[in-house]
Amino acid sequence: MQIKEAVEKGLPLKDVLVIDAHAHLGATVDGWMYIPTPDADTMIKVMDRMGVDKACIGACLGSPDYRRGNDLTAEALKKYPERFIGLARVNPHYPEDIRPELERCFDLLGMRGIKIHPTSNDYPVDGEGYQEVWKFASERKAFVLSHTWHDTPTCSPGKFVSIAKKYPGVPIILGHSGGQGKGYQEAIKAVREGPNLYLDLTGSLITGTWVERMVEAVGAERILYGTDFPFIDPFYEFGKVCYARISEKDKEKILGLNAAKIIRRATEN
């Protein structure tokens, strides 16, 4: 049964590896975005219904209170070690704490990736405060997921090209692929210039048509399925890949095989 047919029948994808490369955990700070079911238990139930094998998660508290946020992520990892991949959070405004916190997250809490949000931290991704993140990721063979958005002073996709060239061994996932039309074009250009850069399909504005355009532009091997779950209903994000007019092999790469390679490299370290 093809992926599209299984989805139309309401069946979970049991024979296809599915990894959500961009998910969150827990409520937002001060309730700035209402999330009805932000807990790990409910997330697992939804993942089971869809046939999602794993999700890369970083707690919403990660921007203002990264230590507490990392502890919340660790609790979910401990409860569901086979289903969640932990993403450590740090703050570039406290550069002296970045390495100690990342060492705690990787060595004691079992995390394998790093999530940064230059917009929330109001700090440019190529600034000095983030340098320890890139150095640590390079040393540990870890991957980095970063929020990106077109035409911002902190994280326009083009800013990542120089970082990718300086740290060629670090897989860098461009969260939201720039956020909107011009951003997608900028992100595509960046991925063409940086072989360790990846497009991320997270975002309500990325349609199936854009999935097709991205595959044509950079190849399915450079694209990762992501949802922003539980911010956004993951079924929409799921559907735009499953219904895209691309080959079954390309869908399988995007839905999970590409992320599996990145995660496996980090886990083997």
Image (tube, helix red, strand yellow):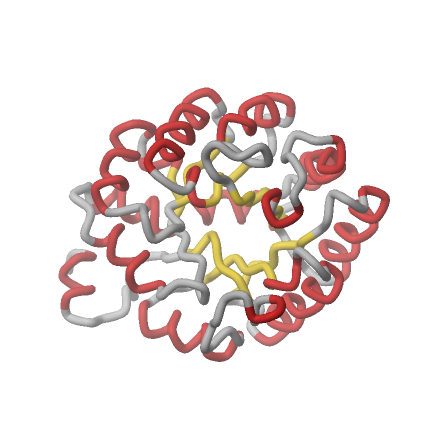
- Image coordinates of residue 13 in percent, x first then y, are 28, 64
- Image coordinates of residue 226 in percent, x first then y, are 41, 52
Q: Which quadrant of the view contains residue 74?
A: bottom right
- Image coordinates of residue 230 in percent, x first then y, are 45, 67
User: Is residue 138 in view from this perspective?
Assistant: yes
The correct choice, above or below, for 230 with respect to 217 in the image is: below
Is the C terminus in the top left, top right, bottom left or bottom right quadrant? top right
User: Is residue 266 in view from this perspective?
Assistant: no
The correct choice, above or below, for 250 with respect to 9 in the image is: above
Q: Nearer the viewer, residue 212 or 258?
A: 212
| Left or right: residue 115 compared with residue 238 | right
Is the N terminus in the top left, top right, bottom left or bottom right quadrant? bottom left
Q: How many numbered marks does the figure carry?
A: 0
Q: Nearer the viewer, residue 203 or 242?
A: 203
Q: Residue at x 17, y 57 (%)?
A: 4
Q: Residue at x 26, y 47 (%)?
A: 207
| Left or right: residue 107 compared with residue 81 | right
